[in-house]
């Protein structure tokens, strides 16, 4: 079995459709009827859902063949795909390095040619980070564009399912299939524009204004900055204009994100009690002891760390001090993005401020991993769409360019990004 997959099993779609003959890898936190969905956790190691997620139903209707469930950081918590109960995934284009996370298995499957396309989920960069580290394209859609029905939730108000592809046009074609309202997810909506996302991949950037937030370049690896600037220069050569913009609230985005995300995770993961589904520990004594042992055995260290952080932030006496302030910061981040996008059509930055980590490098220092999300988490706080597209390499390692657009501005992002891939 490839280390990109937790479960390799073919799920055939219809004989005809826009994705007929295409293979798709699906992140293992997206429900597949009759095929186990583990979330990369011992807690759900043998869980088999009785239903398909809406995106999986749409894949099958479109003629796609699902080729397996991909490895991921446990419950989506991580940026390296090393916190999985099933072991790490190696970066196929940078041996000895991580593929990024938490959707690292999906990006690796596409980069290694083991699937034409893939689905991941992005709570704070979990599609864009592995896309950048593996040298493929990843799209984080606007919150509400893609149904989350059947996605095992990490942080409901932040995450979206998004596509991977070798090219922007490929990823956009997959977005065409999965996007749209769903009666089973009240957060979804239908856009007014019925034109195809794939058709937007024209590569025409003539007259496009690209805002460059100075804060998203500060502190980034020098080689990453040079490679990103070179990609922006290529867009300028094709007729785009760049201008500096500012996002002063960004310095508080990572802190706000981790308070909100861990708080929602603490609430969501309370359902894993060893009674209804998932791992159940053997324990003598009362139910509280069985509950505690089930969660001690079933969850890994990173998941436990985030549950503790979130429970603390929501506890009596601390809710207003932490959670309420984080929500205020979120509103400020959104306001800054709206202002910047009044000056530019799209915004651009390095997707990740560093090249891919070496395997094992960040496990002993979780803070290093959290801070690496500095360029991606603000987008989720603001409910905006973004895309990571290969920008080139530094020291032989992939670098991604992130483009950010206004809400439901995916076609604009796809048009701009397709000039590079």
Image (cartoon, rainbow, N blue to C red):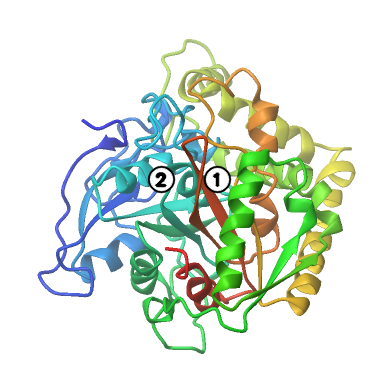
Chain-order first, disc 2 or disc 1:
2
Q: CA distance from mark 2 to mark 1?
A: 10 Å
Q: Of residues 358 and 19, which is closer to you in this image? A: 358
Q: Residue furthest top?
A: 284
Contact between marks 2 and 1 (CB within 8 A): the answer is yes
Point out which mark residue 29 bears.
2
- Give the residue pinned by disc 1: 154
Q: Within the image, what quadrant is residue 8 found in? A: top left
Q: Within the image, what quadrant is residue 385 found in? A: bottom right
The crowding category of the residue bearing disc 1, from other C-alpha atoms within 10 Å (few below 14, some 14 to 19, many at least 20), is many
Q: Residue at x 42, y 72 (%)?
A: 179
Q: Residue at x 10, y 70 (%)?
A: 15
In-image side of 242 versus 161 (left or right): right
Q: Is residue 155 above or below residue 102?
A: below
Give percent across and percent down for residue 309: 72, 32
Q: Of residues 181 and 161, which is closer to you in this image? A: 161
Q: Secondary structure at mark 1?
A: loop
Q: Quadrant of the N terminus?
A: top left
Residue 291 visible to the viewer: yes
């Amino acid at each position: 079995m490839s280390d990109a997959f937790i479960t390799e099993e073919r799920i055939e779609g219809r004989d005809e459709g826009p994705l007929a003959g295409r293979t798709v890898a699906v992140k293992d936190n997206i429900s597949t009827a009759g095929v186990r969905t583990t979330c990369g956790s011992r807690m759900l190691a043998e869980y088999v859902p009785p239903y398909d997620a809406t995106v999986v139903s749409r894949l099958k209707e479109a003629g796609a063949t699902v080729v397996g469930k991909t490895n991921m950081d446990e419950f989506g918590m991580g940026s390296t795909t090393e916190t999985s109960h099933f072991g790490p995934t190696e970066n196929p284009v940078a041996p000895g390095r991580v593929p990024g996370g938490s959707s690292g298995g999906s990006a690796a499957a596409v980069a290694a040619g083991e699937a034409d396309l893939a689905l991941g989920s992005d709570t704070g960069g979990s599609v864009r980070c592995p896309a950048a580290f593996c040298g493929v394209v990843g799209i984080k859609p606007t919150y509400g564009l893609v149904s989350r029905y059947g996605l095992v939730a990490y942080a409901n108000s932040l995450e979206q399912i998004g596509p991977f592809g070798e090219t922007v046009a490929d990823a956009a074609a997959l977005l065409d299939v999965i996007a749209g309202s769903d009666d089973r997810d009240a957060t979804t909506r239908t856009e007014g524009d019925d034109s195809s996302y794939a058709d937007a991949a024209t590569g025409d950037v003539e007259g496009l204004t690209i805002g460059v937030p100075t804060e998203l370049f500060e502190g980034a690896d020098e080689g990453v900055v040079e490679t990103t600037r070179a990609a922006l220069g290529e867009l300028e050569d094709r007729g785009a204009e760049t201008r500096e913009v500012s996002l002063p609230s960004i310095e508080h985005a990572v802190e706000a994100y981790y308070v909100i995300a861990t708080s929602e995770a603490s609430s969501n993961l309370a359902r894993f009690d060893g009674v209804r589904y998932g791992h159940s520990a053997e324990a003598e004594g009362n139910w509280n002891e069985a509950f505690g042992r089930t969660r001690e055995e079933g969850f890994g260290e990173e998941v436990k760390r985030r549950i503790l952080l979130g429970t603390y932030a929501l506890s009596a006496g601390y809710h207003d001090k932490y959670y309420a302030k984080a929500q205020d910061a979120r509103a400020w981040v959104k306001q800054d993005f709206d202002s910047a996008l009044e000056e530019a059509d799209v915004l651009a930055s390095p997707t990740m401020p560093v090249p891919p980590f070496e395997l094992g490098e960040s496990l002993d220092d979780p803070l290093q991993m959290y801070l690496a999300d500095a360029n991606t988490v603000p987008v989720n706080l603001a409910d905006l769409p973004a895309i990571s597209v290969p920008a080139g390499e530094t020291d032989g390692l992939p670098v991604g360019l992130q483009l950010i657009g206004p809400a439901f501005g995916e076609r604009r992002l796809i048009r701009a990004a397709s000039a590079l891939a």
